[in-house]
Every structure is written in structure tokens, then in C-alpha cells.
Image (cartoon, rainbow, N blue to C red):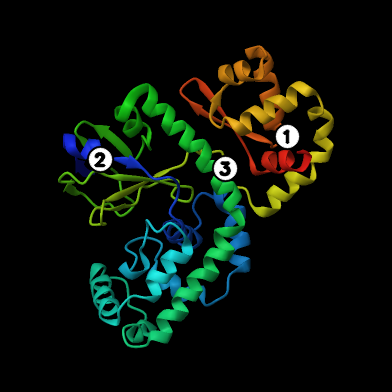
Amino acid sequence: MPLRIHFTAEDLARTRLADGPGPMLELDIALRLLQETSHPTRFGAWRRESLRRLSPRVRRLCDLIPPTGWTVDFLGHATAGTIEEALDRVRATPAAQVRKNMETWAGLDQRRPVPSWTQSLGSDKRLLMELADTAAHAHQHVIAPYQQHIDALNGADQALRARQVAHGGLQALLSGLNPRYIRWKPPVLELTMASGNTGDIHLAGRGLLLIPSVFGAVYPALDDTAEPQPWLTYPVGLRDTDHFLSPIDTARTLSTVSDSLAALLGHTRAVVLWTVAHRPGCTTTELARHAGISPASASQHATVLRTAGLTRTTRHHNTALHTTTPAGHSLLNHVS
């Protein structure tokens, strides 16, 4: 049995897409990935480099954000706009709320032992400050080095979702979020959760905030009690064969740009790259029209740019959607 989210007409009217991944939510999901070995092709290099940079004190943070199960509530703040905003909220959590959240969290999974060091969390403000500082350290080494790539992936995904809505409305959007684990059977959204949780959730007119996630590449995450609106994550449009670029990979791509410039010095290809940068998510036909070339020529130039690591292509049915990569942006900034 899946977890079932029931929509009314009012819920559908209030359902919306977040602008991008929530920084604290992405950190939460990323820390879970670091504690396991799944998806080695996509996240293997990122996992190795992140673990090498992290301080041992991050283990305490992982105690409260286990590989599966619930995160303690005061570390949530999934919709905070910046990591600084989220951590300021953590630091400002009243002691009574910390104690209540810890009691609730400890009771959610009786099989998981509660670490002894957490007994002082509700009475030792210094310990809460250190935990927030540790989260800042983790974000600095797990998320921040990849922010450009996260932004590029999110930009491509936003273009894809906008196209789904434009051509098929919410039906197409909800059906295309994550078809294997999120299934739209009007008026119900069925979720397959990593936890195996089942049941029925009624949104009661609140709608649903759909949050893209780079690290939440498989199972969705959900908080149906979030205020002012419940939220659900869905994966950005990565394929199973894609990998998450590390700073080393990005640097390697940038270091080869000079070798690729011979293929990019032509006027037409420069126009194609500029067009993709200024019209992210454009189709090959749209690219051809705005660049003033034939669709066949646009496809050929787009292939060269993609092979050079300067653009990426996301598939929507039989349509190719083009966006620039961080390397492509850097090249344009360098030559402008």
C-alpha cells in the first residue's frame, strides 16, 4: 500500500513549485546519502570527497539525521531561503522546544538507541550552538562546493517543469515528477516512501509545495504538518546514468576549455552557446529560430557544446531541452 495524498479543487489551486532546493533540506538529504553507499555512479565521487573534508564532529549531526527515518524537528527548516536563515532558527530554538522535539524523536523509532550526548541538548545552550556550527561546517563542505552545479541542474529542471505545465497543466506536472515513486491518480497522489509508510493524508485546502532536490534522487520526502503548507520533494531531472559533478570534475572541464575553443571560435557556435545561456530550457527548434540557423545545424552545434561540457540536455518525451553548465557560464563570462 502506498502513502496517499488526497487533493480537492482548492488543494490543486494552491499547489505550487518551489524556486529551488531548500539549503537545509538538501543538507539533510545529503547527510543521509553520506551514511550509505547507494548510487555509486551518481554520487560516488561526491561522497568520497565530502567524507574526506568533513570533521569527525559531523557524527553528532548524523546521530540526529540518520540514513533512514526522521530528523529531529528543530533541525528541519526545509523552506528556509538560505542556510544562514535556517541555522539562525536552530540557534534560536527555545530549550523547552528542544526537549520536546527530542522526546518525540526518540519515541518515533524504539529500535534506534538515543545517543547519550543528546541528554544535555535541552539544558546546555552551548551544545545547541555547537550543533548549529557543525551544520554550517557540513554545508560548507558537502553542499557549497557544488552550488554552481546544483543551480545549473535546478535551472534545467525548472525549464522542464514549466514546459510540463504549459503543455499539460498540473496533470502533466504531477504525473512527471517521479513516475516510479510518485504516481498521480486523480484526485490522489500515491507515494512510495523509503520508510515504507502508508496511510491517507488530506491536505484540507492547504495545497502542496513541490520542492526539487538534487540529492533526493530516488524516494520522495514529505512533511504533511509543515506550516504554512505541506511540502514534498521530487528529484531534479537526472537520469540514472548521470553523475553529480565534483569540483575536481568541474575544474577538469574548465581546464579543457582552451582545447575546445578551436571548435567554439566560429561565430555560429558562439551564438548558439549565448542563446542557450539566455534562453535556458529552449528546445532545438527554438534554439534554431533564435540563433537564425536550421534545426539540423542547431542540433549539430548543441552536440559539440554538450560534448565539450558547456551545455547539458534534458529530455522531455521526444524533446531535447538545452541549458548551459557552470563551465559554459564561466567561458561566456571569460570571453565577454
Residue, x 46% and y 23% (percent of image)?
317
Task: Tell me how far mark 1 sits from mark 2, CA to CA.
Answer: 41 Å
Q: Which quadrant of the figure has residue 61?
A: bottom left
Position of 198 compared to 232: left or right? left
In this rendering, the answer to whether 279 lies above or below 1 is above
Local SS, label 2: helix
Whichever of callouts 2 and 3 sits on the residue coming sooner in the sequence is 2
Point out residue 18 in the picture as x, y percentages from the top left corner: 39, 45
Point out residue 163 in the picture as x, y percentages from the top left corner: 43, 27
In this rendering, the answer to whether 130 lies above or below 81 is below
Q: Which quadrant of the figure has residue 301?
A: top right
Task: Tell me how far mark 1 sits from mark 3, CA to CA.
Answer: 16 Å
Marks 1,2: beta carbons within 8 A: no
Residue at label 3? 152
Q: Which quadrant of the figure has residue 170?
A: top left
Task: Tell me how far mark 2 sits from mark 3, CA to CA.
Answer: 27 Å
Residue at label 2? 14
In this rendering, the answer to whether 268 lies above or below 42 is above
